Amino acid sequence: MASMRQERREKLRVKLTEDPFLTDQQLADLFHVSIATIRLDRMALNIPELRERTKEMAETTHSKLRSMHGMEVIGELVQLDLGSQGVSILPIHHDMVFERSKIVRGHHLFAQGNSLAVAIVNSSMALTATAQVQFEKAVRLDERVVCQAKVRERKQARFVVDVESRVEQEIVFSGTFVVMDVAHKEDMNP
């Protein structure tokens, strides 16, 4: 019994290292145990709850931003590697959905992806030049959208950024944003 618990806890640690945004409910479903068991395992491993993990990641990430202020990023910025990639989380609240269907208004998903694409550009001023997006699946009230942005290509002041947003493991929004490093472009053309 103790070795099964040890084994589960080690797998839990690995799983949260791979995806720190998993909820206790998702972990309980994954390991076929109760939420209470997951909470006890997390406490034994000194792993904070999701809200605390997210808050810690956001606090260290906001100081890296250059192209915008932290409050301008739509969603909670939890990972940022300037010039490379970033992650934000957007919890869907009542004021973001259509009243009748409880489905999120699309501009919230676009804004999350767009602001993250701009945020990862390592510049004091960056702006979106173009965007090609797809809304893949409806997002509903109380869901959490995890958005990942990655720079695919960079040519001088032009960044091509791929964005994928997921609810749990399903893609709900994707796009390609062309972001211009306006500060760099101005330096090149005096």
Image (tube, grey):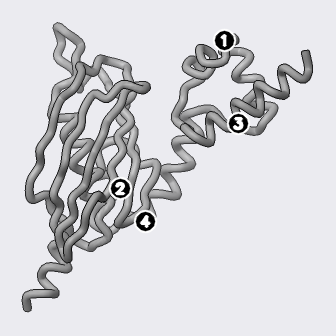
Q: Which residue is mark 4?
A: 64
Nearer-N-terminus badge (2/3) = 3
Q: Residue at x 15, y 62 (%)?
A: 127
As drawn, the label of residue 70 is: 2
Mark 2 element type: helix
* Quadrant of the rendering where the C terminus is positioned: bottom left
Horizontal relation, residue 19 to residue 184: left or right: right
Nearer-N-terminus badge (4/1) = 1
Give percent across and percent down for residue 99: 18, 12
Q: Residue at x 29, y 65 (%)?
A: 121
Give percent across and percent down for residue 167: 37, 26
Q: Nearer the viewer, residue 12 or 93?
A: 12
Nearer-N-terminus badge (1/3) = 3
Cβ atoms under marks 4 and 1 closer than 8 Å: no
Nearer-N-terminus badge (2/4) = 4
Q: Which residue is mark 1?
A: 32
Which of the 4 quarters of the picture holds residue 175?
Answer: top left
Residue type for callout 3: Arg
Give percent across and percent down for residue 72: 27, 52
Residue type for callout 4: Lys
Q: Residue at x 37, y 62 (%)?
A: 84
Residue type for callout 2: Gly
